[in-house]
Amino acid sequence: MPSHGAKFPPSGGLEGCILFIFILLNSFVSFSQTKLKDTVNINEVEVKAIKPKAEDKSLEPMQQITKIELDRNAGNTADGAVKTFSGVILKDYGGVGGIKTVMVRSLGANHTGVFVDGVQFSDVASGQVDLGKISTDNTDNVTLTIGQSSTFCQPARFYASANVISIQSTKPLFDSLKCHYKIGYKTGSFGMINPSFSLQNKIGKHSFSDISGNFVKANGEYNYKVQDITLKRTNSDIQSLNINARFVSEYKDSSKLSMKLYFYNSERGLPGAVIMYNPYSSQRLWNNDFFSNLQYQNNPKKRLQLLSNFKYSNNYLRYLDPAYLNTKGKLDNHYRQHEYYVSQAASMKVFDSLHVSLATDFFINSLDANLPNYARPTRYSWLTALAMQYSYKRFESNGNLLGSVVREQTKIGSAAQPRNVIKPSVMLGLKLTNKPFIKFRVMYKDVFRMPTFNDLYYSLVGNNNLKPEDAKQLNFGFTGYSHLGFIEYLSFKVDGFYNRVTDKIVAIPTKNLFVWSMTNIGKVDCRGTELQFQFQTKPLAKIRYSFLCNYSYQEAMDVTDRKSSTYNQQIPYIPFETFSTNISANFKQVTLTYSSLFNGFRYVLGENSYDNMLHGWWASDLTMLYDYKIKKNTLRFKAEVNNIFDKQYEVIKNFPMPDRSFFVTLSLMY
């Protein structure tokens, strides 16, 4: 247990929350005092019910944010969509262009796979995906799954990650219209300009195209305080262009062929750590990413389902540090990644209660760099997943075996050892009651993470003898949903979890403090509890309210060496407690949303001393959304106030986060 008390937010934050709730309740009272129509003579009664959400009855722990909720919340990138999920820790270096990665339930960012429309974003060099690069402007939903989805007929890659973030694009409904479009413009703090567009066209009877894009330019400058001195954050500018295109064709037998193209180009400054009042940084980062994916899926209603994928990706990264002290007077590194990927999945309904699935993926990853004597590695990976799903009355189960075969070769030096691994996974569920719906669920999953190319081959640091990281996940809990009086829909989830990571890859000094090496010495025990609760009311005096609350408590203890000073201490940057809430009120075309996120105290080093403690923080956002109909068009106005109480806080030590900021978005949809 931690030796220090959690730092709860100052009274200003709580007063703001109480004030906002009071305003909502007061508005409800005032509306409720208006005279209601006579309800004695009723001609007919229409009974409506909300369809249960997939995450509220799922066998695996799952959280989802829908398009409606994405539109209401602040921000328009994937990091903003997932940061309030239970168990998620967002590592944010601050600013519009700051790199943003996630850890789920104390497992490193490398253990979380990120998929868009079933296609994985892969970075074999670092193993981490910057969620700030993924726009949610044209997104239908964002889902976080612990373990893996119980959806059948999916690529083997879905089984290979401890956690999966899945982003699904919107599917157009044309009806009598053959074209939909959306143009938008966002501006505000940090000198931001952010135009965007989306164009969906019906091509023929059963085909359509979907092209979307957005451009972001911002100087990224904001004020922050070091004690009583106000400084300005610099070198945090960004300029980026993101283009997405989909072409989908459906055939008479309901089979579907789709192609997806993704392009991202950016240049950004990397703001450095603020040490001894010195905010200077001159590092720059360039990205140029592209991938294309071709997918075929037969009629999903057939007894035998087929899913085929073919993908090619090409990612370029340049890192420049003009102040680096070497013979050249700078550090200018270039990296280029290639991936060739093919996947075939098939599932069959043996009978109504039993489904079996087989998926096999083969992919080739290569990395080239301008580093002296760089290994130039190529990795060949073959994944095969055999899965089975069985349900009978109140009982359901889902299990799989994932076989992984990995081979590597290098042009310079020795390659990493070959790996042949089989890992199991099983999920069990028992429906306890129907009204209210309550299910008990248990999940166990064993996964491994291959070392990244940086772990294995980076100059002076890489170690080609590294073993894969092994992670065992255990989850047990309850999920349920119901309705109660004026509450149209309510749901809850209670989960306890335990993760054990062995052969954890960590960096340690070797000959001196300037020469480090990667090695397998880490062991971490992660245990915790997650609580989730949400409800939505029926219209009360024409106002509909919704409320969402997530709470997590987790301990991630270093159990590597009993003689070490860090033994049984919380690992760096894992807060013991996180809490998020979202309150929304909708009246006709206007929606007001208040959201807040609390991160408890955590430590920046393995020794849990007060000097190494980073205090907890509480940040709140407020958004207002207004839709105005103009014939068949919709004019949308969105206003955002982020960090409304102007809190000074850090997610990463010495990397101050932005102060209060304002944004306005105007968009026209047809």
Image: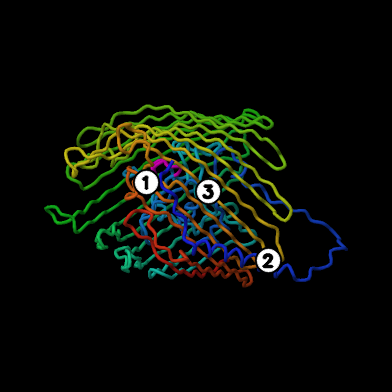
Residue 445, numbered label: none
Q: Is residue 75 visible?
A: no
Foreground residue among 507 and 79: 507
Q: Which residue is mark 3?
A: 551
User: Marks 3 and 1, how far apart in space?
Assistant: 25 Å
Foreground residue among 342 and 437: 437
75 to the left or right of 207: left
Dot 3 falls on a residue whose secondary structure is: strand
Asked if residue 397 is positioned above or below residue 323 in the image, the reply reads above
User: Marks 2 and 1, how far apart in space?
Assistant: 46 Å
Q: Quadrant of residue 455?
A: top left
Determine crowd level at label 3: few under 14, some 14-19, many 20+ residues with C-alpha closer than 10 A. Answer: many
User: Marks 3 and 2, how far apart in space?
Assistant: 27 Å
Magenta part of the chain: 104-111
Determine crowd level at label 1: few under 14, some 14-19, many 20+ residues with C-alpha closer than 10 A. Answer: many
Eye-nearest disc, 2 or 1: 2
Q: Earlier in the sequence, mark 3 or mark 1?
A: 1
Q: Which residue is mark 2?
A: 28
Asked if residue 621 is positioned above or below residue 548 in the image, the reply reads below
Q: Which residue is mark 1?
A: 128
| Three-letter code for the amino acid on which mark 3 is drawn | Tyr
Foreground residue among 658 and 364: 658
Foreground residue among 322 and 1: 1
| Three-letter code for the amino acid on which mark 2 is drawn | Phe
